[in-house]
Image (spheres, helix red, strand yellow):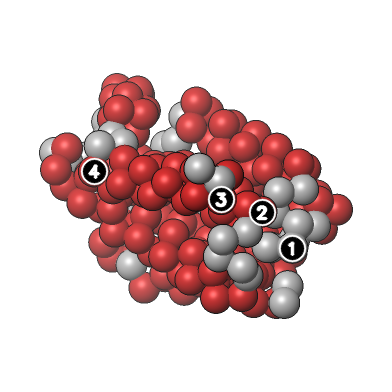
Amino acid sequence: MSFAWAAAIAVSLLLLWSLLEGDAWRERAWAICAGASGARDRGPATRRALHRILFAGASIPLLLGLFATHNIVAPRTWIAALLALLVAHGLTIAATIDEGATEIPDAVTIPILTLALLASGSGALDGAFVTPRAAMFGAGAGLALGGLLPASLGRGLQAVGGADVLLLGAIGAMIGVAGLAVAVMIAGIATALLRPLLQRGGGALPYAPGLALGFGLGAAAASWLSV
């Protein structure tokens, strides 16, 4: 069996696992956040449904953009797809937790950022999204932007926290500055439109669900721009 076909099977199994049975990490992180912040009561079935919606929004545009512009059987393309799906899965886990608990543990965000940096630094995404050099600039831009957003959003909104800063860095590392700009724009629009559903009273507004959706479109844009 060729490496390309083995990678294709791995990506397919990962997608299936993420949509059907990949709940243990999310449920454990949810339990940690629920105990710390008094998360709103959502059953496992509701959280799984939300996770699948966000995962589809994060992964399907990404994969369409990737495979529309690159050789679908090339090993580099499958490596990029596998790494991108891993990050997309992590982002949607973070988004599902953030929506209910408005708090994302470091056990979720740090692995996402680490995986994104390893993926971009390895060069596996070179030719699919951005070069390792551009990815480093993207990561820096994401972390810097995440640090600046809370002040610009104002005290009444408080949508961006420390966990969101790490997620922005991970997105920038995966898709560069141009893709990050698209992701942040989409995330801002989605968060504003869904604010009545996401925000509880005068509490913090979850930003990670919008970032998960923005990542998919931003990655697709980065893939098309790299052609």
Which of the image's four quarters has the C terminus?
Answer: bottom right
- Cβ atoms under marks 2 and 3 closer than 8 Å: no
Indicate the position of residue 207 as horizontal and vertical percent values.
46, 55
Looking at the image, tell me whether mark 1 or mark 4 is earlier in sequence order. 4
SS of the residue under disc 1 = loop
Label 4 sits on what residue type? Answer: Leu
The disc placed on residue 76 is 2
Choose between 92 and 122: the one closer to the eye.
Answer: 122
Residue visible at 35% across and 60% down in the picture:
56
Q: CA distance from mark 2 to mark 1?
A: 8 Å
From this viewpoint, is residue 30 visible?
no
> Is 49 rendered above or below residue 1?
below
Q: CA distance from mark 4 to mark 2?
A: 27 Å
Residue visible at 68% across and 43% down in the picture:
119
Q: Is 60 positioned to the left or the right of 218 in the image?
A: left
Circle 1 or circle 3, nearest the eye: 3
Indicate the position of residue 59 as horizontal and vertical percent values.
44, 59
Disc 3: which residue? 4
Choose between 82 and 141: the one closer to the eye.
Answer: 82
Looking at the image, tell me whether mark 4 or mark 3 is earlier in sequence order. 3
Label 2 sits on what residue type? Answer: Arg
Label 1 sits on what residue type? Answer: Gly
From this viewpoint, is residue 64 visible?
yes
- Cβ atoms under marks 4 and 3 closer than 8 Å: no
The disc placed on residue 127 is 1
Looking at the image, tell me whether mark 2 or mark 1 is earlier in sequence order. 2
Looking at the image, tell me whether mark 1 or mark 3 is earlier in sequence order. 3
Disc 4: which residue? 20
Disc count in the image? 4
